[in-house]
Image (cartoon, rainbow, N blue to C red):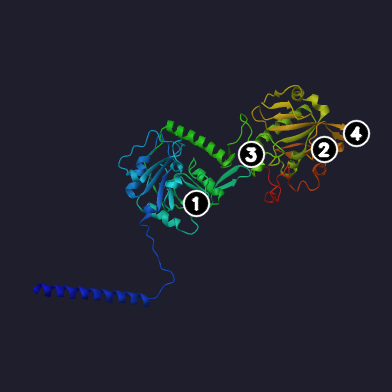
Amino acid sequence: MRVKRRLVTLAFIIVNIFVVLLLIKCLVRQFKTDSPITDQPIIINNYSNYDSLITVIIRDFEHFEHDVVETVNSLLKTAPSLRILIVSNVLPYPPLHWKSVNHSSVKLINLKLEVGGVKEDRDVLYHVQTKYALFVPDSVRPTSSESFIALLKSLDEPNVKSLAAPVSEISLSSCQTMDLNLVKWTLTYSTSPSELFCDGVTGKHVLLIEKDVLSKLPDPFMLPFPDSLYIQAKAKNIKTRYLRTVVWASGHPILQSQHHLWKAHRLRHERQQRMCERLAIKRIVRDGKDEWYGCTRDSARCFGTVVGDTPSYLLEGKWTPPCCLNALRTTARHVFKELETAGVRYWLEGGSLLGAMRFFDILPWDYDVDLGFMREDLPKLTWLLRASKQPVVDTQGFVWEKASEGDFYRVQFSRSNRLHVDLFPFYNKNGTMTKDTWFPTHKQDREFPAHYLNPLATISFVGQNVSAPNNIREFLELKFGAGVIENPAYPNPNLIKFPIDLIPTTKPAPDWDY
């Protein structure tokens, strides 16, 4: 009987508790209904889960001396759940020896192709499962979790997709502007007047960037890093916010010995060469100084045999590589000097004369220089006489030869690099200048009245005054047609039309001063 009474009492208490809970639920629902509804709830992101938003990538380090292990340790000490990728072109040697690192959060990605491997092994972005990638250079330390959070907060600002912050307060990093002219194969660096948004950042710095941005670049992990990434981003008009208010700390000093500095410098130069080759950059200008990454006198020229008057680079939407133009200018100046010293009467012909009228220079898309000369003056120049029998290399390494295509001469930049000046021997026939070899596909290759050479005039070309026909405009319109100076066209307009957006509105300054 006593047990039954206790059970009844317990059931009564449970029922009362249920009723009370039901009343509380109804009151809460009523309170929500009566409360004013705001248009947009305010959500405050304190980034307490920052380690789930970021994948750290260590890309730029030297195998022979680095601080990668301690850098990783310091990152995981601040954020134990952080995902870290170490990316290398080959398996690091000596191998990385981990100490207290949680191996489950660290992955080494070897970009070297392995026959027995799978595609995903070398796909860095496949292993980035977070919204952001944080590129950390070798030997840096986060000062606290705020090192990550401050970057995330700034990247959340409107129109910011990429963010850089210096390493150490005395960092020599700086904001740069790039002028990437893919048509001319040229990249020009200058210091940015504003250190807010940059085309690139120099010096030691961390870089936080959205994964979606990286996926738009053809090869964001190319060495030298991050130089190659910034160049690819510039081609996509992606800028980087430069944030000086966030500073990361430096780690252990590395690359201190002269030998290791030399090795690092040599490797960087080799990587720069490979990067420029892959990105089709032949000339880099820094602080007004040129760095050349194209053909040289000891190498072949940058393009092969020209077919249908259309060199291969025009089909790529580009103009003559600047290294090739420079070699043509050098060869032309040498030929002018030899002709003038020997007393040979010569003049600019065809597209070269057209380039002089437009730019005081070679046409930016041309691949040779054309000169006419008086055939009767040929015996005055020893090199031409000797070239009539067999090719000959002069005292400065230029190759003089009789062209295989017909009765004219050619001066090559060198035996290896066959960029050249063509010399066409004209003679007077009843008041008309003519020659024995013609090119039917070149409409400008035609006879002309001898009075255009009596007297000869001069015009500025490749940095010096050279001989030209008199009444140049009339001469060119006779050869090419009316309005030829004002209306640029490629050699074979039926194949490729000249892009309207590349027609200059004003006569540009000459680009031959290098």
| Element under disc 1 | helix
Disc assigned to residue 213 = 1
Instruction: State yes or no: discs 1 and 4 in contact (Cβ < 8 Å).
Output: no
Name the element at disc 4. Answer: loop
Q: Residues within 10 Å of mark 4 (few under 14, many from 20)?
A: few
Give percent across and percent down for residue 219. Answer: 51, 44
Q: Amino acid at mark 1?
A: Val
Q: Which residue is mark 4?
A: 430
Which is in the foreground here, disc 1 or disc 3?
1
Marks 2 & 1, CB-CB < 8 Å contact: no
Residue 420 visible in the snapshot: yes
Residue drawn at x 24%, y 75% is 20
Q: Position of residue 408 (x, y in %)?
A: 77, 29
Q: Measure the C-alpha gap from mark 1 to mark 3.
A: 31 Å
Along the horizontal axis of the image, is 148 left or right of 415?
Answer: left
Going from the N terminus, do you reach mark 2 or mark 1 first?
1
Q: In the rendered image of this protein, does residue 330 appear above or below residue 358?
A: above
Q: Quadrant of residue 489?
A: top right
Residue of label 3: 322
